[in-house]
Image: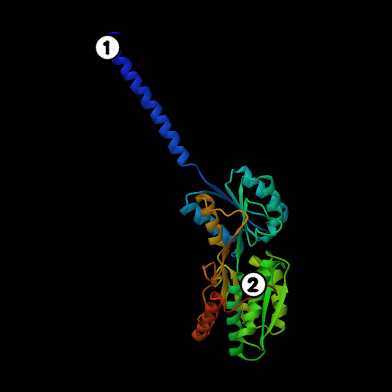
Amino acid sequence: MSIVAAALVVVMLAGLAALVGSSSSRASTQASKATFVATLVSDIGKFNDRSFNQSQKDGLNRARTKLKVKTNALQSNSPSDYIPNLTQGVRLKSNLIIAAGFLLAGDTNTVAAKYPKIKFAITDFDAKGDPFKGRKNVMGLTYASQESGCLVGYLAGLMVKKQGGKQVVGAVGGIKIPPVDTWIAGYKQCAKLANKNIKVLVDYSNEFVAADKCKVVAENMIAQGAKVLFQVAGGCGLGTLKAAAAAGIWGIGVDKDQYNDAKRVMTSGVKRVDNGVYQAIAKAKNGGFRGGGNLLFNLKNGGMGVGKINPAVPKKFITAMNKIKVKIIKGQLKVKTKV
């Protein structure tokens, strides 16, 4: 072989090695950039409820930005959309599918059983119990709503005592399910803790969307002398807040801080379902997913709280409420979970 030919062979081999190395490097880079996909499926309250579902979508959007994941938000307009949306999440090659609430439990279990390699999370449901018991690809996102319910109920009780006259407050629930009742249980218990003479009216609209149905329930309570109304009905509950404002009484929001959603909002019981969605995605992406278990959000870890408080509420009432908060966190006050 001539010197020139030998040199050409060396150059060709070097080029081939570089090509193989470059290809291998590109493959490695692509693998490291493999996209994590998270899908959120709403309940019938829809993503424009300015409350429960919208807050979860906020958490999804935050995860997309901060965790650099791909996200999908699938809205359910009726219960018949649950399984199609959950299944669409599978088709979208989701690594994690989050069901936005208690109402999706049965359908989430059905789809999770069919696709055991895909991770699922569900808001407001204990994954340790039925129907998920023993299912290792489902994680519950649970909230001590009764704790925040207690704080806003305590403020309500103090405010009505200060006003004098009829000592009546109310709670307008949506559909009577445990995640609604836990809020109301805390509200009722601590309104009475603040004001032993208070009467707490409780009724349900059987609705999470149509604001006019909550408005009717609210107006009935106002006719019975209620001076504060706590809405626990998602988008429907905006009708409660507006009915309270129209009657010149106080309204209390739920899930998100609803201070600006109506006039005369005293405060809101805040449930950080946005944080729940964000943390579920972070854990599933980073290897911390707890299938068959739950993430608990409460006052102690900031998963529950109270929204902006109206300046009309005396500072001494806020101080008293914060003392109740400390007692709850320390375990000195046990808040009921059933109405």
Q: Is residue 81 visible?
A: no
| Badge 2 or badge 1: first in the primary sequence | 1
Q: Is residue 117 visible?
A: yes
Mark 2 and mark 1 in contact? Answer it, CB < 8 Å.
no
The amino acid sitting under disc 2 is Trp
Helix or strand or loop: what does disc 1 sit on? helix
Could you say where residue 140 lies in the image, as x and y percent from the top left? 62, 58
Q: Residue furthest left?
A: 3
Judge left or right: residue 16 versus residue 237. left
Residue 77 lies in quadrant = bottom right
Q: Quadrant of the C terminus?
A: bottom right
Could you say where residue 117 lies in the image, as x and y percent from the top left? 62, 44
Could you say where residue 279 lies in the image, as x and y percent from the top left? 53, 57
Mark 2 crowdedness (10 Å alpha carbons): few <14, some 14-19, many ≥20: many
The count of marks equals 2
Q: Is residue 64 or residue 297 the one in the foreground?
A: 297
> Does 106 appear above or below 188?
above
The amino acid sitting under disc 1 is Val
Judge left or right: residue 34 versus residue 53. left
Mark 1 crowdedness (10 Å alpha carbons): few <14, some 14-19, many ≥20: few
Q: CA distance from mark 2 to mark 1?
A: 86 Å
Helix or strand or loop: what does disc 2 sit on? helix
Q: Residue furthest bottom?
A: 165
Q: Is residue 128 or residue 267 the one in the foreground?
A: 128
Q: Which residue is mark 1?
A: 4
Q: Is residue 3 or residue 259 the one in the foreground?
A: 3
Q: Quadrant of the N terminus?
A: top left
Q: Residue at x 27, y 8 (%)?
A: 2
Disc marking residue 148: none
Q: Residue at x 33, y 15 (%)?
A: 9
Q: Which residue is mark 2?
A: 183
Could you say where residue 309 lies in the image, as x and y percent from the top left? 52, 77
